[in-house]
Amino acid sequence: MRNPFDWDYLTAPLWQMPTWGPFSLSYFVVLCLGFLTCLWLYNDPRRLIRKRNPLLADFLQRIAGRGLVVFSIGLFFFLFRLGRISAFDLYKRIWLYLSALLVLVWAAYAAHLLVRVYPALARQRAEELRRKQYAMIPKRAARRATSAASQRKSR
């Protein structure tokens, strides 16, 4: 097997390269699974997670929406290779490698959002809800007292 990072290997013409190989197969499987997972996460968290944690559902939807774009770009370049279409040299391996790099950048971005950004916002939101909850207690007690007093007067 040739060096996968050799420039001649990355830019080989269409007739010199096989469509399916170990890299192509793993690339295709990862892209399809990633696309389907992002599609499911983009459409489904509202029903599964929204009631329990709307902030997490919003984060997952944002990450999955960007993931759909990333995986679509990779599948677009792979379709040129699969269809053996030589338009604008989009069939070359270099585009697949750049798409794989884009997937890695997206994965790092998603990990950053879920590990660094989300916990801080979740703590802030929990504190905000706690403040609202404690602020509501006196109002509820005042309403109960006034409604109880009005019920006593009406008897």
Image: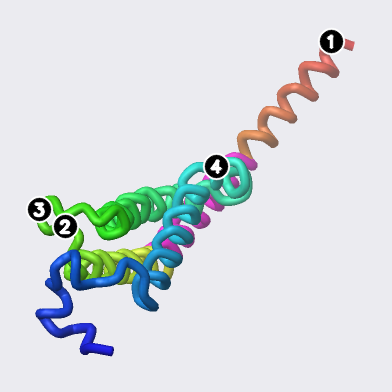
Pair 4/3: label in front: 3
Contact, CB < 8 Å: mark 4 with mark 3?
no
Q: Against 133, is 140 above or below?
A: above
Residue 116 in sight here = no
| Front residue (pair 137, 113) | 113
Pair 1/3: label in front: 3
What is the C-alpha distance between the residues marked 1 and 4? 47 Å
Contact, CB < 8 Å: mark 1 with mark 3?
no
- Checking the image for residue 90, the label placed there is 2
User: Which amino acid does the dot numbered 1 rest on?
Assistant: Ser
- Checking the image for residue 154, the label placed there is 1
User: Which amino acid does the dot numbered 3 rest on?
Assistant: Phe
User: Which amino acid does the dot numbered 4 rest on?
Assistant: Arg
- Checking the image for residue 46, the label placed there is 4
Q: Mark 3 points at which residue?
A: 88
* Residue drawn at point x = 75 percent, y = 22 percent: 147
Magenta segment includes 38 = no
